[in-house]
Amino acid sequence: MIVDSVKKGLLSGLSTTWSLGKVIFPVTLIVTVLQYTPVLPYIINLIAPLMNFIGLPGDAAIPLVLGNFLNLYAAIAGILTLDLTVKEVFIIAMMLSFSHNLLIESGVAMKTGVKLWVILTVRIGLALLSAVVINLVWQGGSEMAQGTAIGEAAEINGTGDILLHGVIQALSGIGQLAVIVIPLMVAVQIMKDLKWLEAFSKALAPFMKVLGMKPNASMPFVTGLTLGLAYGAGVMIQAAKEDNVSKKDMTIAFIFLVACHAVVEDTLIFIPLGIPVLPLLLIRLLTAIVLTMVVAYIWNRSDRVQRKEAVYEQ
């Protein structure tokens, strides 16, 4: 039985890696190449004047653009090149916790059937709202943020070198995805065949009900919460297909996850910068819970009204 589960998991993992790789490769290649063109500097200069509205200096546009186009590691590299206060770094960290790696994570999220406008509205909206609130409410954090020196990047010259660098980065991204997704899919298949997932879903049922979702959405929910949208997308896609997770439950789960996902990595990564990471985690978690409960309540109430209207019409 275990051997069959491993085989099914491997096939599922390879299929998922191929599916997500078709999103990750072109996006990573294009964005990496754009770093060596006037496009990204132009976008940064365009955004810079808007920074004052959220309590940030103009050059803070650099990590925000890098974080949204690439990932948190690129954003932190950008932060470490700037002189920023703890409050300014905290605002950037909070914004990027809600809104980072938009192109790839939005692409893989759409693979599960969630609408693009839902993903972008929630992530960008929460990022901007959190920045405004923190800037107005928090009066501290005026000391300079900590940081560590970054080694100089290898010099890249010429179109050929840039394209090669982009291809290597894209293939590296797919490789990192495969290393996580394939073993994960094997583990999920084994747990599914051993009926462990059923027990897990039952244990989470009360919490899922509070958030307005059915128990069968628990596995993609927990996967996204711990591993993130990009790495957890494989399990989410499989769950949507095999476990009959409804589009409604998947959308509600993603509304939670776009606000709060990969909670361990996305929180710990900011510790070296000297910002308070516990409030960072708690704000994300509470925001996700409240937002999801509100959306689920409105959606469920709307469904009940529509069913009543349908009954009256009959």
Image: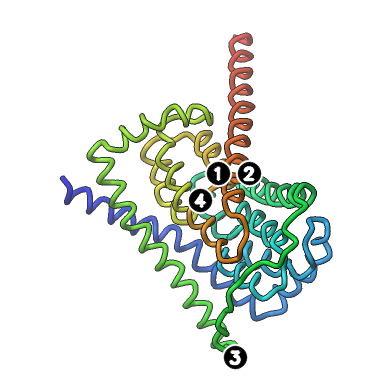
Q: Nearer the viewer, mark 3 or mark 4?
A: 4
Q: Mark 2 points at which residue?
A: 118
- Is 297 drawn above or below residue 104 in the view shown? above
Gap in angstroms between the C-alphas marked 2 and 3: 40 Å
Which residue is found at the position 77% from the left and 62% from the top?
56
Compare marks 3 and 1 and give the one earlier in the sequence. Answer: 1
Specify which label sits upstream in the sequence, 1 or 4: 1
Q: Tell me how far mark 1 sits from mark 4, CA to CA.
A: 21 Å
Q: Do the residues labelled 1 and 4 touch (CB within 8 Å)?
A: no
* Image quadrant assignment for residue 58: bottom right
Q: Nearer the viewer, residue 115 or 96?
A: 96
Q: Please name the amino acid that badge 1 sits on.
A: Val
* Residue toward you, 139 or 213: 139
Q: Name the residue at 59% across, 87% down.
A: 159
The circle drawn on residue 263 is 4
Amino acid of disc 3: Asn
Q: Distance between the residues labelled 2 and 1?
A: 7 Å
Q: Which mark is residue 157?
A: 3
User: Residue 217, image x and y in percent?
Assistant: 44, 36
Q: Is mark 4 on a helix, strand or loop?
A: helix
